[in-house]
Image (cartoon, helix red, strand yellow):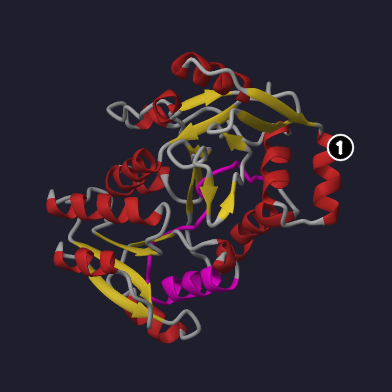
Amino acid sequence: MSGNGIKTIALAGVGSIGAFIAEELLTAKAAGALDGVIILTRAGGSNDAVGQYAAKGARVEHVDYADESALANALRGAAAVVSTLGAAAIVNEQLALARAAKTAGVQLFVPSDFGNNNEGQTRGLLGVKATLYAKIEELELAWATFYTGLFADFGFVPCVGGRPLLLGFDFENGVVTVGGDGSVPVSFTSRRDIARFVVHALTTFPLEQLRNKFLRIEASRKNFNEIVSIYEQKHGKKLEVRYTPAEELRARLEKNPLDFFALLHHEWIEGRGAVGSPVDNGKWPEWKPTPVDEFL
């Protein structure tokens, strides 16, 4: 059983990171660390995995984020809500989820903010994420955020969301494009390891270590020049590295604020790719995350 009062956790979104968190929640339930797991899925949507979650003991709720009353009812009994909603839903639907969580008596809300350190940001998607905290606090709803850095098992794949080479790592053709001079450290953590830490924290950490806290975790902290070197040594393949100056990234963002490559690489060269310090890995000493080297 949970030692901090969090005995039922609801999860909104079972996509890129959410699927891993769902699996870890159900593992925790099977081990007796949780009494209940609630999976929210959009009404009318189809997902074979959702049926599998139900078969493993999850309470699956089909929801419409425009119906906050029904959404609050779907969250009945939950002590914590974890949101992994995507960028398109990061404002209106996530705030609807937070309001419904407050109505349902939820103790802790984990917003969909896994990744870069967004503290103090005011522009773009990262700025939008940063400003959500004030709106959540206006509801007098406690939150906890997990800064994790780049998903080590996902960030280097050649195609993300149908957009090829979104982050500039074309290992197949031997070309890597990075922002700045590639010397600024970035944090890396795999989705599996993130899910393990999040669920462990929610089920075991005292609430005072969670309420309105940024928890910073990372498996590795490397700059992109080091990533290139590791890849070359591991595969015996020389890479061509193309460096994009900061001023070019800023110009691209002025032209198109949704230029994801420019946005992320600009944030990284500004130092916001690292989760900050001190890191909170030590709050669970048994957590041994897989280093980024293994995913190259």
Q: Nearer the viewer, residue 163 or 96?
A: 163
Q: Give the amino acid at mark 1.
A: Glu
Q: Nearer the viewer, residue 92 or 102?
A: 92
Query: Where is residue 83, by image quadrant?
Result: bottom left
**Does the rendering let one see residue 243?**
yes
Above or below, 219 against 89 in this view is above
The residue shown at (47%, 79%) is: 65
Magenta residues, start to end: 92-119
Does 3 sit left or right of 263 as displayed? left
The residue shown at (63%, 30%) is: 175
The location of residue 291, given as percent across then percent down, is: 41, 25
* Residue 231 within the magenta-colored segment of the rendering: no
The residue shown at (29%, 43%) is: 200
Does 233 sit left or right of 249 as displayed? left
* Residue 111 within the magenta-colored segment of the rendering: yes
The residue shown at (53%, 51%) is: 160
The location of residue 198, given as percent across then percent down, is: 36, 45
The location of residue 119, given as percent across then percent down, is: 65, 45
The location of residue 281, given as percent across then percent down, is: 40, 30
Q: Nearer the viewer, residue 129 or 161?
A: 161
Quickly name the residue at label 1.
247
